[in-house]
Image (tube, rainbow, N blue to C red):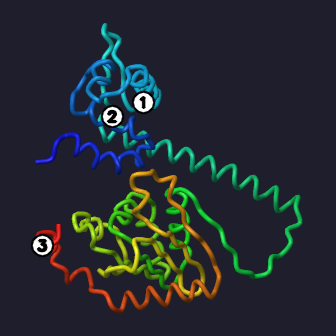
Amino acid sequence: MMSFHDQINGIASELKDILGLDDLETKTYLNLLRSGPITASALAKELGIDRARMYRTVDKLASRNIISITLSSPKLCIAVDPHEALKIALGKKEDEINKIKKSGEAIIDKINNEIAINPVNTVPTFRVVQGRQNIYADIAQLIENTTDIIYIATTLEDVSRMYHSTIPEKITMCEKNGGEVRLVVNMDDPKLAPFVKRFNATETRICKLPSKGRMVVQKNKKMIMSDSATSFQHSGSDSDFSLCTNSTEMVDNIFTLCSFLWKSSKPFKTIDVKNFVRKNG
């Protein structure tokens, strides 16, 4: 049976990105949900950290309405309901999006009115994208704008993280525009298989990938590729790097590779996941 510590670590890795918290803030919130009202000093002892650091963490969470603090003596920390915490996180993101839209439209108008934009010839471009959130944003944009085939070849761990981004929603938009998203996943971690069904890909197949990297490629257009989508798990999402390019030669080569993997893979629906987990988990 898993200890609470193990449960905390498993949930925290997903929850922190959703609520926009760091590791300690996430563990503090989850421990408060379990323990109920408790002093910051007792919570620091339970988590094995310095009390001053715990007080700073509690103050940050309270300022964001993730927890509340009583007026009693001693003061007690109380975690808000998870549904309320999610509403707070969504509200913050919606405010940020509205601000970007409003400010962005005004800036674009100024650029169009005040700057003579020189036309750019079609030349291959390369850029390195740092940070998982930025990479997922690029992937979401790539999917949203395509009306053709896109391959995503990656690990189940990476799929589980993408599930909590806007990528599944963009897949639906892509399909409405006539596009198709084909997901090829590695079954090295079968316990995460349920995320595959919820990911919303047009079609999914199982294949032993040549590496633990991430390949996302749009036919004849663009590709986003990471050396390893899983090696950054313990070093933080900011350590995730991807190469993004529209080089015809590179795009065609990766698309051909993904097409080969697709043809040599097995449809996910033919895999008995429970049996697979029992034999390989």
What amino acid type should be assigned to the residue bearing mark 1?
Leu
Q: How many marks?
A: 3
From the viewer's perspective, is residue 71 above or below residue 86? above
Label 3 environment density (alpha carbons within 10 Å; few <14, some 14–19, many ≥20):
few
Mark linked to residue 279: 3
Q: Earlier in the sequence, mark 2 or mark 1?
A: 2
Residue 147, percent from left and from top: 53, 82
Judging depth in this view, the residue of 90 and 62 nearest the camera is 62
The single residue placed furthest to the top in the displayed view is 73
Judging depth in this view, the residue of 255 and 218 nearest the camera is 255
Image side of residue 28 versus residue 64, left or right? left
Q: Earlier in the sequence, mark 2 or mark 3?
A: 2
Which of labels 3 and 1 is toward the front? Answer: 3
Residue named by callout 1: 61
Residue at (30% x, 17% y) in the render: 76
What amino acid type should be assigned to the residue bearing mark 3?
Lys
Residue named by callout 2: 29
SS assignment at label 1: helix
Q: Earlier in the sequence, mark 3 or mark 1?
A: 1
User: How far apart are the two marked residues, 2 and 1, measured between alpha carbons?
Assistant: 8 Å
Image side of residue 97 versus residue 66, left or right? right
Residue 128, percent from left and from top: 62, 65
Judging depth in this view, the residue of 165 and 227 nearest the camera is 227
SS assignment at label 3: helix
From the viewer's perspective, is residue 20 above or below residue 275? above
Residue 11, percent from left and from top: 29, 48
User: How far apart are the two marked residues, 3 and 1, measured between alpha carbons?
Assistant: 43 Å
